[in-house]
Image: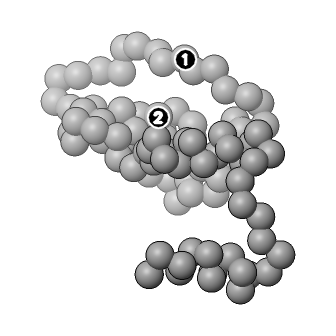
């Protein structure tokens, strides 16, 4: 199944190239996944760009950790933070303020 993605808005032609740097493993995995959907990497990039123009936003949510989450991650990466021997102990601590 091949999608007809070569069409552009009336009077417009595909006259420019977009280049992006990405690691080869991700490119290969994405190429395989897109091929299974009948799409090329160029098709996917074109779809993304058209959606961004149409919606004036990315067509997916980007989740950025807030300050509290970033602080918790930094604490854990530094080897600090609470540790629990069991799930029950963790849940008891989580529910302690209830």
Closer-to-camera residue (72/63) = 72
Q: Residue furthest bottom?
A: 88
Residue 94 in the image, given as x and y percentages of width and height: 57, 74
Closer-to-camera residue (41/23) = 23
Q: Which corner quadrant holds the C terminus? A: bottom left
Q: Which residue is mark 1?
A: 19
Residue 13 in the image, given as x and y percentages of width and height: 29, 21
Among the 4 quarters of the image, the one containing residue 37: bottom right
Q: Which badge, 1 or 2, is on the more N-terminal residue?
A: 1
- Residue at 36% across / 21% down in the picture? 14
Residue 29 shows up from this direction = no
- Residue at 44% across / 44% down in the picture? 66
Count neighbours of disc 1 (C-alpha within 10 A) and say few if under 14, some if 14 to 19, many if 20 or more. few
Give the label on residue 45, or none. Answer: 2
Q: CA distance from mark 1 to mark 2?
A: 10 Å
Residue 4 in the image, given as x and y percentages of width and height: 39, 46
Among the 4 quarters of the image, the one containing residue 57: top left
Residue 23 shows up from this direction = yes
The secondary structure type at the circle numbered 2 is helix
Residue 93 in the image, given as x and y percentages of width and height: 62, 75
Q: Residue furthest right?
A: 85
Q: Is residue 63 above or below residue 97?
A: above
Count neighbours of disc 2 (C-alpha within 10 A) and say few if under 14, some if 14 to 19, many if 20 or more. few
Give the label on residue 77, or none. Answer: none
Closer-to-camera residue (6/97) = 97
> Horizontal placement of 66 versus 22: left or right?
left
- Residue at 71% across / 53% down in the picture? 81
């Amino acid at each position: 199944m091949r999608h007809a993605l070569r069409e552009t808005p009336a009077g417009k032609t595909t006259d420019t190239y977009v280049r992006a740097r990405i690691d080869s493993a991700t490119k290969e995995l994405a190429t395989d996944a897109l091929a299974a959907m009948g799409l090329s990497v160029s098709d996917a990039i074109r779809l993304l760009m058209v959606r961004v123009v149409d919606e004036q936003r990315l067509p997916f949510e980007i989740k950025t950790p807030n300050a509290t989450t970033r602080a918790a991650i930094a604490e854990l990466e530094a080897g600090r933070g609470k540790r629990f021997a069991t799930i029950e102990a963790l849940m008891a601590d989580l529910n302690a303020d209830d």
